[in-house]
Amino acid sequence: MRQVTTHNSRIAWRRFDCSKSPLHLEATLRTGQSFRWCRDANGVWWGTIESVGVALWQPDGEPYGDLYWQTFPEPDLWEVVEDYLQLRTDLESLYCRWSFAEPRLAEVFRAFAGLRVLRQPPEECLFAFLCATTNTVTKIERSVRYLAERYGARICTGLDKPATLFAFPSVSALSAADERDLRAGLWGYRAPFVIKTAQKLLQKPQGWLRALRDVPYAEAHEALLEFPGVGPKVADCVCLFALDKWEAVPVDRHIYRLGVRLFLPHFEGRSLTPRLYKAVAEAFRERFGPMAGWAQQTLFYAEAGLYRRPDKESSRQRRF
DNA sequence: GTTGGACCTGCTGAC
DNA sequence: CCGCCCAGGTCCAAC
C-alpha cells in the first residue's frame, strides 16, 4: 500500500485501484441519490452504510486513480464498500453502447465518467425520497440528516474526527416519531408520510422491503406505490438506487425536460402526466437498454447542474 | 386521461 | 433589502 502522508494517515487507509473501474466519487455521492455524505476540510468523504461508518478519499479526485477507504468501527469491510459503490459494474462498455445509441450525449457521458448508481440500504433510500417532493437537494440533505441525528444510533469511529456519524433510524423508531417534531425538523407537510409509511412497513414481514430486490421491476414498483407519499417517481428512485432495478428511470422535471427535448419533441409543452411519465421512461429504455437508469443518473447530474460549484461559473449553457 | 391547486420550509437568483 | 418564485412530486377533486 502506498504511503499517505497527511493528517489522513491516522486512518489505516486501504487502497483500491480504479484504473479499470472508474469512480467519480464526488459526482456519485452528490448526485442526489444519497443524501448524508459529507466531505471534510481535508477532502475525505464520511458516511454510513447500514450501521457501518465509512471514510472515502480520492486524493486527486481522479476517477481512474486511487480510491482510499476504511470502515468503522469494524475495519476493512471491503465487501460493504464495494457493494455500495457497485465497483464491479463495468462502465466502459456501457458508455460505448450509450454513445452509439445517442451520439449527441457522448460528451456528457465522457465528462462524468465514473458516476455510479449506488446500491443503497432500501429503508434509508425510501424514507429519504419521501422528502424529495418539491424540495431542494440541500434541504433534502439537511432533512435526512435530521432524521438520523434525532432518531438514529451513534456510530463510533474511534477518531476525534469526523463530526459524529449516525446510523439511519430503525423503522420502529420512525413509526413512533412525533409529527410536530418532524414538521419542525424541515419535513413540513411530508412529516405524516414518514410516520405512516413506517407504520405500514412495520406490518410487513421482516425483510419484506429488501426482498423486493428479487422480484421483477414492475412488481417492486407497484408494491412501493401503496405507501403514502410514494408516487411513480419516488418508487422509481427506490427501485433504481436500492432495489437493483437498473431499468427504472425516475422522471423528474429535469429528466422530463431533457427527454422531451431530445427524444419526444412532439410532447414539447405538455405537462407531466402519468402517461407521459411512462413515455419518457420508455424512451430512455429503448435507447439505453436494461441499464437505462444509470444513463438517467448521469444525464440528471448534467441537466440539473449539480456539478456547478457555488462559485460563479459560466451560467446555464447547454452542451447538448 | 388531464388539469389545477395545495402543501412546509428555507435557499437562491433576479430585480 | 424585500417580496416573489421556486424546489428531483403527490394527492385530491373536478372535468
Image: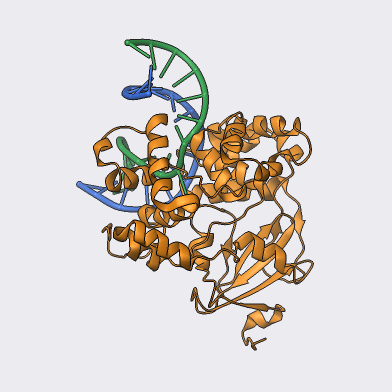
Chain colours: A orange, B blue, C green
Coordinates of residue B5 in the picture (x, y in percent): 37, 22
- Quadrant for the N terminus of chain A in the image: bottom right
- Residue lying at 39% horizontally and 63% vertically, measured from the top left: A109
The answer to whether residue A203 is left or right of residue A111 is right
In the image, taking residue A311 as reference, residue A135 lies left or right, namely: right
Identify the image quadrant of residue A117: bottom right
Q: Quadrant of the C terminus of chain A?
A: bottom left
Q: How many marks?
A: 0
- Residue shown at the point (50%, 76%) measured from the top left: A64
User: In the figure, A13 relative to A112: above or below?
Assistant: below
Percent position of residue A258, x then y? 33, 48
Residue A293 visible to an observer of this rendering: no
Which residue corresponds to the image point at 32% horizontal and 32% vertical from the top-left?
A271
Nearest to the observer: residue C4 or residue A133: A133
**Rendered position, A281 above or below A70:** above
The image position of residue A209, as x and y in percent, is 69, 40
Residue A207 vertical placement versus A270 (above, below): below
* Residue A122, visible in the rendered structure: yes
Whole-percent x, y for residue A284 in the image:
40, 47
**Is A296 rendered above or below residue C14?**
below
Say whether residue A195 is left or right of residue B6: right
Q: Nearer the viewer, residue A307 or A219?
A: A219
